Amino acid sequence: MKNIFDKFNRPVKDLRISVTDRCNFRCTYCMPKEVYGEAFKFLPKEELLDFDEIEKIAKTFASIGVTKIRLTGGEPLVRKNIEDLIRRLSKIEGIEDIAMTTNGYLLESKLDSLIESGLNRITVSLDAIDEKTFKKMSDQNFDVNKVLSAINMANKKGFEQIKVNCVVQKGVNEHSILSLLDYFKESNNIVRFIEYMDVGNLNGWELSQVLSIEDILEIIEQEYKVQPLDENYPGEVAKRYLLEDYSSEFGFISSVSKPFCTSCTRARITMDGKLVTCLFANNGLDLRKPLRNGCTQEELDEIISKVWINRSDRYSEIRHKLSASKNHKKIEMFQIGG
């Protein structure tokens, strides 16, 4: 394995693979129903990367420094036979950790097969635990208790520490901050509060809707004694804290108020095979075409390495300049994963 670095001396360590553009939720900040309604045409199966192609891409990334893979979507659990892909990825030399981000609604019935396939970690996106807000933010008439039950069962079956990600929108779900901490504080699970980000172009994002980590922390400190924790490893994205009276960890992801571009080590693959080097990118390099034209593993290695070596993304640090430009069209969240 060789490590390669981009123009800001950032290595590539993490690979996020979106396996589908489909989702059973219609979260207002990701796939608003007025855009992605019943008439919306998702990609046909033949335009998605197949598992052979995903495995080939993952092998290249493992050879240049990637040790962690996260499967995203859309909702990854709607991808047929996703366990087969996990099984294949887990056998790649150099890959130490395979995780999945899911909304959790289909999780409980698939836990045994996910464990058997080699999945190491689970992150559940959960923006509220009260029924009214959960239904409002997911924009579906689903029962939040099904997600909570899946988390509980996953804990019992061996996923001892699940990360629970909550996107916080001002005026929408601030009350979820304390209710989520209250619910999970005596478990080993970690709640992470994510600043509402301007991923994509169709969710109507405004800076005025962002509740900063300082604002969120102020709300938490009204009820709990907290203390900051050291990072688990250099360049860790989440800022970690402890609820002192419960020895329970929580954290923040602050792409808006405190950008972490300088330490970003993530590459992303869209469901149709584009290599994207920033969550806020406006395009990506098509890997599907050379793959389907029969490129060798060595040729793919060269293509991907060249992209990373020339990477210079730092959108969150210069957001104020680019956001003013109507020409900066970004890839949508459901295509690239969170």
Image (tube, rainbow, N blue to C red):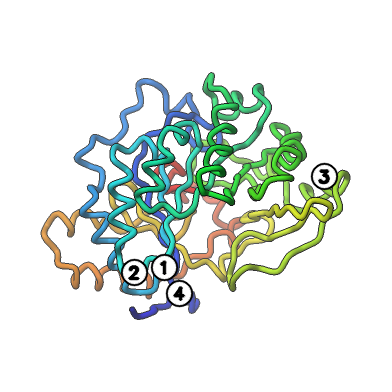
Q: Quadrant of residue 39?
A: top left
Query: Of helix, strand and loop, which one carries label 1?
Result: loop
Q: Determine which residue is flagged by label 3.
A: 219
Q: Is residue 202 left or right of residue 236?
A: left
Instruction: Report which residue position mark 2 lands on.
Output: 62
Residue 270 seen in this snapshot: yes
Direction from residue 138 to residue 219 in the image, left or right: right
Callout 3: SS: helix
2 and 3 marks in contact (CB < 8 Å): no
Point out the frontmost of discs 2 and 4.
Answer: 2
Nearer the observer, 293 or 126: 126
Decide: few, some or many residues near mark 3? Use Cα within 10 Å; few <14, some 14-19, many ≥20.
Answer: some
Q: Earlier in the sequence, mark 4 or mark 1?
A: 4
Give amino acid for label 2.
Answer: Ala
* Labelled disc at residue 67: 1
What's under tag 1, amino acid-wise? Answer: Thr
Give percent across and percent down for residue 49. 25, 48
Residue bearing mark 4: 11
Residues at circles 1 and 2 in contact by the CB criterion of under 8 Å: yes
